[in-house]
Image (cartoon, rainbow, N blue to C red):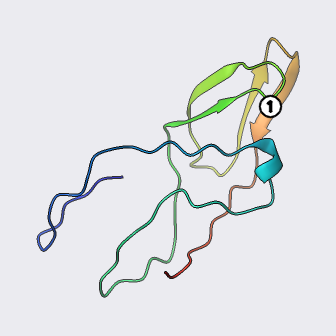
Amino acid sequence: MGMKCGNCGEISDKWQYIRLMAEDNENFKTIVEFECRGLEPVDFQPQAGFAAEGVESGTAFSDINLQEKDWTDYDEKAQESVGIYEVTHQFVKC
């Protein structure tokens, strides 16, 4: 995410893609870092724009919306349901 506030300079608009693998399940992984001065984040609400790839089939799924913290679809190549369930987050102070 790139943002600009009244007291800040332009933040880079370069995107970094984070790969979360099936074996990363149950482990937190850094997907974003915030520099907060005088603020403390209390919640994170994922939205649309995520992508996934079928583990066995390689089927690409794009524009995944995680606003409901769950996502399901059907992988035609693997002939099975796929999904992302119970998305959680944590904030860690650096």
Q: Residue furthest top?
A: 77
- Looking at the image, which is closer to me, 66 or 92? 92
In which image quadrant can residue 61 be found? top right
Residue drawn 86% across the image and 17% down it: 78
| As drawn, 1 above or below 88 | above
The answer to whether residue 90 is left or right of residue 79 is left
Which class describes the residues within 10 Å of circle 1: few (<14), some (14-19), or many (20+)? some
Q: Position of residue 51 (x, y in %)?
A: 58, 33
Q: What residue would you read off at disc 1?
A: 82
Q: What residue do we see at 65% from left, 32% from top?
A: 52
Q: Position of residue 86 (x, y in %)?
A: 74, 55
**In the rendered image of this protein, does residue 77 appear above or below residue 72?**
above
Q: Secondary structure at mark 1?
A: strand
Foreground: 48 or 54?
Answer: 54
Q: How many marks?
A: 1
Q: Amino acid at mark 1?
A: Val
Residue at image x 45%, y 77%?
41
Question: 21 left or right of 4?
Answer: right
Residue 30, above or below 70: below
> Where's residue 91, x and y in %?
56, 75
Instruction: Estimate the x, y position of residue 18 in percent, counting from the top left.
Output: 56, 46
- Report the residue at 54% width, 56% height from top: 31
Left/right placement of residue 50 relative to residue 11 reads right
> Is residue 61 placed above or below 94 in the rendered structure?
above
Q: Is residue 29 left or right of residue 9?
A: right
